Image: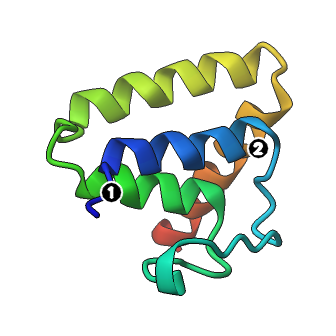
Amino acid sequence: MLVNPLGRIAFVLLFAALGCTGGGETVISGFGNSGNTVGASVFDRVAEELAESPAIPAVSDDDLRAAFSAIRADALEGDPKAALVLLLVAGEQREESD
């Protein structure tokens, strides 16, 4: 039986929406437990599924700039999650320049 890749993405997104994002959860299911990644975060699994799906268009540099601009704006308005991302990006940028 072939599994629809978009169905697998929806399944992982459901777990993400339910708050299973810490990377400490382990969900093993499926026939023979094939294709399971133990220890990867939900975001890593979603990104991998999306990147491998032929139905998903490639992310362009402009897409990344727009996403970062939105995250930056949210961070400056006080969103703590966006602020964390902004701080992590700033740390990486400063590490590269050292």
The one of 91 and 60 positioned closer to us in this rendering: 60
Residue 7 locus on image (x, y percent): 41, 43
The one of 11 and 72 positioned closer to us in this rendering: 11
Taking the image as shown, residue 4 lies to the left or right of residue 30, namely left
Residue 44 locus on image (x, y percent): 53, 62
Q: Is residue 59 above or below residue 78?
A: below
Q: Which residue is mark 1?
A: 3
Image quarter where the N terminus lies is: bottom left
Taking the image as shown, residue 40 lies to the left or right of residue 87, namely left
Q: Is residue 31 above or below residue 89?
A: below
The one of 86 and 53 positioned closer to us in this rendering: 53
Residue 93 shows in the view: no
Front: mark 1 or 2: 1
- Which color scheme does this rendered protein use? rainbow
Q: Which residue is pictured at 14% across the width and 47% down the height?
A: 54
Q: CA distance from mark 1 to mark 2?
A: 36 Å
Q: Which residue is pictured at 63% across the width and 57% down the height?
A: 42
Q: Residue furthest bottom?
A: 32
Q: Which residue is mark 2?
A: 84
Label 2 SS: helix
Q: Amino acid at mark 2?
A: Leu
The one of 54 and 81 positioned closer to us in this rendering: 54
Q: Which mark is residue 19?
A: none
Residue 38 image-quadrant placement: bottom right
Residue 15 shows in the view: yes
